[in-house]
Image: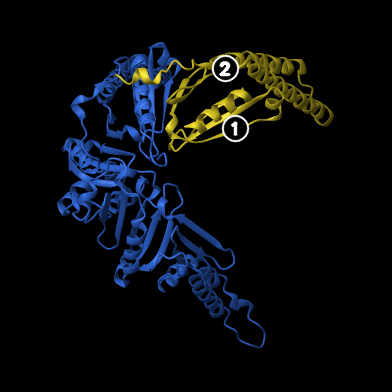
Amino acid sequence: MGPRAEVTTEEMPLQPLSREALTVRRIRVAIETAATLILIVAALVVARRLFDFAAPAWLIVLGVLVISGIAWWWAGVDHARWRWRLSKDLFEVRHGVLVHRSYMVPRSRIQNVTTKAGPLQRRFGLITLTVHTAGARTRSVSVEDIGVDKASAIRRRLDLV
Amino acid sequence: MTSGSAAEWRRLHPLTVLKELGALAWALIAVFLLDFDTFSVPGDFVDLEAIGAVVVFGYAIVRYLFTAYRITDRALEVRRGVLVKSFQSMPRDRVQSVGTNTGFLGRLAGVTTVEVSAADAEDINLGFVSEADAERLRRVLERHVPAADDGGADPDAEDAPTPLSALGFDGLIRYGLTDTAVLFAVAALILGVTLAIVFRWFVAPLAVVPVLFIPVVGTTSLAGFRSWLEDGRVRSEAGILGKRRSEAPTGRIQLVQVVRPPLRRLKGWETVSIVTGDIAVSNDGMQLAGRVGPLVPAGDWKRLAETMFGPVAIDEPDLRPSSRLTIRRAIVRGMVPVLALAATSLIVASIVDLGWWPAAAVLVLGASVVTIYGWARWRALGHAYDEHHLLVRRGVFTRRLVLVPIHKVQDLTITATFFQRRLGLATVEVDTAGLSGSVLVIDLERARAEELAEHLASVAARIALPDGV
């Protein structure tokens, strides 16, 4: 197929996410772990006071910590899988650990671009960029925790077309 | 109806009051069910039910009086509501289609409901209007529609409608008898009669009636079907008692879908539909929805597609198979329930002292069914593409063929699950603005999947559409 060479333009190789993105993801895991632990401790205290129920607290806490450890590791694996690229014709995003997905959106089909950033993302200069199409099934493709500077560069380049 | 900027607000047809009453029927029923007379006012005899009925009638009339529409230079506007006011406005250059839906009584009274659709899910329904008004609405609204702006029908052929397909009485019968729902109905009938004979349970066949009802109703709604091409639009109409008209500009067609349910395939027929971003045209639940050829000889889809959007260079013989490894995937997936069933029968058989042979039988039978299915599935999978179109086929029992004009591609996804990656396979999903019909090219070798996706993406990227749809 002839036109293939046109798409895989060499102007930009696939971009990984920054280290800050991994930091943000790990902080999220830490926050979720802390929140879960607080809830469980509270539940245990209440259970003991009201029903005189003594659960093996250390076992539950250990379980939470093991799961959190897995989540910590998983955040790294997932982070390493993210790639994005804006070429002459296409916006591409790849991610997924168990199921690998790569999305390709022709630039002329992009209807609009939205960004969204939570407090944690803002603290680290990150943002979630979403590209919307008129497609009935996929509808939008997102890059989570991309650098603010990169996101605005993408928006600028898309506006030029 | 002039299209000046100060266009007049127009009311709907007075018979709309009956429609409003229909919507208020719950209130009327409530008035009579609550039986207010039991709390009749002492001394005076006041018929509260009559008052209730008058109030409901009055409300219906007021609702009718508060509903109006107009066509300005830019938009079709509708205002409704007495207490809660609503205002709908649809830009005229966004109007995709103007269809009509006439019920049996409406047909006697000469009124119809006009359905105006844009590419979104929110249609404007104007009902009732007189048939003359409906025609006028259609003419005025369609004048602004950029019909067929990309490779649609020849604009010079405006006045001559090109017939696409028609369904006569015998065709209708054949359509009904080859519907998959009929297969289920017949199976249910056999079951019902068996129950009646064996268990002397004579109500059983009666329970089948509703199952028979669906294909019968579905089929009769296609009575008198015909479709044709006119002014760069695909139009169709059907119905004996009521009548439904539907249309779609050829430039808005996202894909053509060909469905061959088992019985229809056996007899060498197929059903051809178009899919657009318009919910009224693409809703699978409606029988007329998008149909251009409800029952045509197998392979006729190509003639229909070419009439609608010019030459199509690829055909079914060009289809290239998916990777043979997909058979292995189907077998592995299919063996999971077979093994579970075999294990269960082993346990059950050991309890009733039957030994290992029932489990072995389940295993052998299951394995052969799964293998044959896997092979048949691979035989059905196929895809072909050139610079303009993508053709995809799949389906073991109900075979489906989808033709996508590549410039309608919105985005692409290459998916590879853990199991696919072990075999070096991937699936390409092609997304259009069409509201039904998934376009999946299943289990290609990774490199072929990428080649296909990149080809489709690059062709789509090179063609800019006026509003991206």
Disc 1 marks a residue whose amino acid type is: Thr
Residue B44 x/y as whole percent: 64, 88
Quadrant in the picture for residue A146: top right
Left or right: B33, with B41 as reference point: left
- Residue at x 76% of width, y 15% of height: A58
Label 2 marks which chain's residue?
Answer: A
**Is disc 1 in the same subunit as disc 2?**
yes
- Residue at x 84% of width, y 29% of height: A49
Query: Which disc number belongs to residue A78?
Result: 2
Q: Nearer the viewer, mark 1 or mark 2?
A: 1
Residue B437 x/y as whole percent: 35, 37
Query: Judging from the image, what is the letter of the chain drawn in blue?
Result: B
Asked if residue A72 is positioned above or below residue B187 in the image, the reply reads above
Residue B463 x/y as whole percent: 35, 33
Left or right: B295, with A108 as reference point: left
Q: Colour of chain A?
A: yellow
Image colouring? by chain
Q: Which residue is mark 1?
A: A115
Answer yes or no: is residue B105 visible: no
